Image (tube, helix red, strand yellow):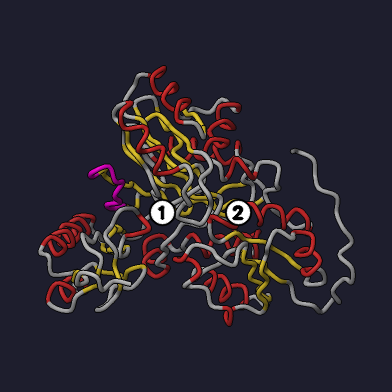
Amino acid sequence: MGSRAPQIDLGGRPSPGTPPSVVLVDPGGTGSRFVEIFREHGWATIAVNSSRSGPDFVVRFFRKKHYDEVLEFEDLRETLVERLSGRSVGAVVPVFETGVELADWLADRLGVAGNGPALSACRRHKGAMGDRLRACRIPCAGHVVTDDLDTLVEWARARDRWPVVVKPVASAGSDHINICHSVDELPAAFRSIVGTVDAIGNPNRELIAQEFLSGQQYLINSVSHDGQHRIAEIWRFDSSYEEGIHIYDKQELLEGTGDPQDSLVDYATRVLGALGIRYGAAHVEIMLTERGPILIECAARITGGINPGASHAAVGHDHLTMTAEACLEPERFLARPVTYTLRKRLGIVALRSPVDGQVAPGAALDELLSLPTFSGSIPPVYVGARVTRTRSFMTSPGLVYLLADSMDDVLRDTAAIRRIEASGHLYAEDPAGTRS
């Protein structure tokens, strides 16, 4: 697993005047921002889709016209490398979760900087991730990976500490997270995962069960170059479990240093090292427990739902632009301090719809869009925008960014958003039988 794949002859080399190219793997809508940045520096842009039928929320925002070239990948890796020969590829960037392993492999085969394929599985499979941390003596959650209900039950009974978390091994966005409080709840959790397809299009042939981590959750977004890490953002993250569903609530951007930020950054950096993340973006989710920071999961790609205007106002950068900078101007990137200084207070509120329907016209929407700290939403909230009943992060109608000089103002408008939603006038339910 640790051996490097033999290099193939890439054929004709580019002429000295050929501009460098960036390969963006599974770029979706976010990839268009990478396109803008790389083109400003004279780079060509190549989109590689790891599957023709990716997740809907990625595919529907993909625009072929944004890219100089689009390549579809259907398990013919060597053919893909041959097609990229002569393109003078200078960087390979995974944009969405599904592209991480292919990006690792491509960078290695094309001879450009990357994290390498040896630990790719540890960066995608939550069980392998936990095993790797344990092997590196980094505190982590107890877990079992299985495709067998009896094994799941035996593990839970042997632990006899409840609740336990049962979820897919390689999905994202709080997809199919089950919080089980007794053995009796395990069979339903098992059936909801094994034999199904996860939210990003992968077949669930097994699941992972983990100890339930109690404490405060934090998100750390980082960018790395040659093993040197820079912290883009540290977020305090709040969510809840309602009727067995993991519901995102809100986030608060914290100062780059302090308590507990310093210990969180130290732990996150150890995780990056253990998982072999030496280049590119990472999104690290950590629970601060009684025994210290414990990893929930780590993704080797940029965070989702970036509002560049709000992020730049708050810290002078965003996760995507820092990732591009590490590829394009590594010396400038490495000159950055390890962490950042907060310029403004920034919060994010995850909208919640109780119905399948659409955003309704009227005073409720007008009030939301007129909040003093409102600094945009991802995706935009507008009359007629389709919504589904919120069951996870991926089914939230959107993330509302709130920007102010004072956190009190952000918290005031956070409460106002929940009041607006509770009024029942922000979302209109589809009439029975009319939803497509």
Q: Residues within 10 Å of mark 1 (few under 14, many from 20)?
A: some
The secondary structure making up most of the magenta span is strand
- State the residue lying farthest toward the bottom: 65
Please tell me which residue lies in front, 329 or 299. Answer: 299
Report the Cα–Cα distance between label 2 and label 1.
30 Å
Please tell me which residue lies in front, 85 or 345. Answer: 85
Specify the quadrant that holds the C terminus. Answer: bottom left
What's the residue at 39%, 70% (across, down)? 309
Residue 318 percent across, percent down from the top left: 46, 62
Residue 343 percent across, percent down from the top left: 35, 59
Please tell me which residue lies in front, 219 or 84. Answer: 84
What's the residue at 27%, 63% (across, down)? 402
What's the residue at 34%, 59% (across, down)? 395
Query: Residue 210, located in which quarter of the rendered image?
Result: top left
- In magenta, the rendered stretch is 242-251
Examine the rendering and report whether any part of residue 349 can be seen.
Answer: no
Left or right: 358 in relation to 43: left
The amino acid beneath tag 1 is Thr
Please tell me which residue lies in front, 236 or 52. Answer: 52
Residue 143 percent across, percent down from the top left: 47, 29
**Number of marks in the rendered image:** 2
Magenta stretch encompasses residue 250? yes
Secondary element at tag 2:
helix
Dot 2 or dot 1: first in sequence order is 2
The residue beneath circle 2 is 100
Query: Residue 342, located in which quarter of the rendered image?
Result: bottom left
The residue beneath circle 1 is 341
